[in-house]
Image (tube, rainbow, N blue to C red):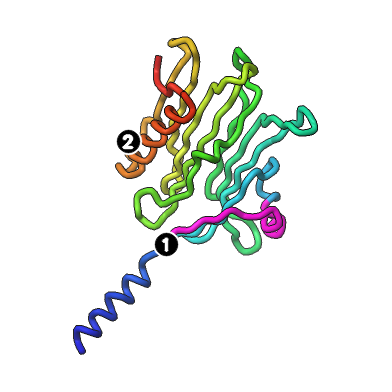
Amino acid sequence: MKNFILLLLISFSTFSFSQKTESYKLTKQEITERELDQVSDFPIYKAFECSDKGGVYELLLCENQKKISKKDTLNTKIQAICTMNDHGGFLEKWRINDLLEDTEPKETNIWFWTKYCSIKDLDGDGHIDPVIVYGTRNENDEIRRIKIITVYKNKKYAIRAVECDLDDCRSFKKDKEWNTLPQKVKTYLDNLVIKLRKEQDLLLKNG
């Protein structure tokens, strides 16, 4: 009987304190019903509901779209916003902003690379660690800038790269505090860089 009670207590403890992380994409109707368009400055490209030990929140990917024809659009600015519903309002946890840079050749488009973005618990601590990947193209339709921003415990850690045919204008830099990330997170990001190099034929290096 004592062994049964002990087993029951252990099972209850594991059930009570474990927390599964989940995320799913919101529909346009859900975005409208939740009035999430009030949070962003630009149209919402994609939105996700996420849940972890910290609660339930929304991740919004927003793009400032400029129409160049009936079918095609280019983005001049982007925002990624993490927000929680708070007593009828919105409590912002963090935000990422970026826009086209004045370069030669000129940058003409900036976009979220959702294929490489992720909303996972990378180190198994019960909290989702979003990885936001976006890039820019120039007027020659060449990829110029790539940014990989990881949000760990609501703090942003970035990898910034500039692609260029010439050695002196090519760069690949990690934030100074990048090495303070848990090893599991760094391993995931290093593998993501390798994947980008392979699948997109990018150099992602200095010089």
In the rendered structure, are the residues bearing label 2 and label 1 in contact, judged by CB atoms less than 8 Å apart?
A: no
Q: Secondary structure at mark 2?
A: helix
- As rendered, which of 120 and 157 lies closer to the eye? 120
Q: Quadrant of residue 152?
A: top left
Check residue 196 in the rendering and tell me which mark sits there, or answer none. Answer: none
Q: Which residue is mark 1?
A: 20
- Residue name at image x 55 percent, y 56 percent: 24
Find the magenta span and give its range. Answer: 20-36
Asked if residue 34 lies in the magenta stretch, the reply is yes
Which of the two residues, 123 or 81, is positioned nearer the viewer here? 123
Could you tell me which secondary element the residue under label 1 belongs to? Answer: loop
Q: Would you call the spot at circle 2 few (<14 residues within 10 Å), some (14-19), or many (20 or more)?
A: few
**Residue denoted by label 2:** 179
Q: Is residue 181 above or below residue 200?
A: below
- State the image coordinates of residue 189 (x, y, percent, origin top left): 39, 37
Q: Which is more N-terminal, label 1 or label 2? A: 1
Nearer the observer: mark 2 or 1; the answer is: 1
- x then y, percent, for residue 190: 36, 34
Q: Is residue 44 left or right of residue 56?
A: right
Q: Residue at x 55, y 23 (%)?
A: 143
Quadrant location, the N terminus = bottom left
Quarter of the figure with the C terminus: top left
Q: Is residue 117 magenta?
A: no
Place residue 57 in its image quadrant.
Answer: bottom right
The reply, left or right, for residue 181 in relation to residue 21 is left
Residue plotted at (61% across, 39% down):
79
Q: CA distance from mark 2 to mark 1?
A: 27 Å
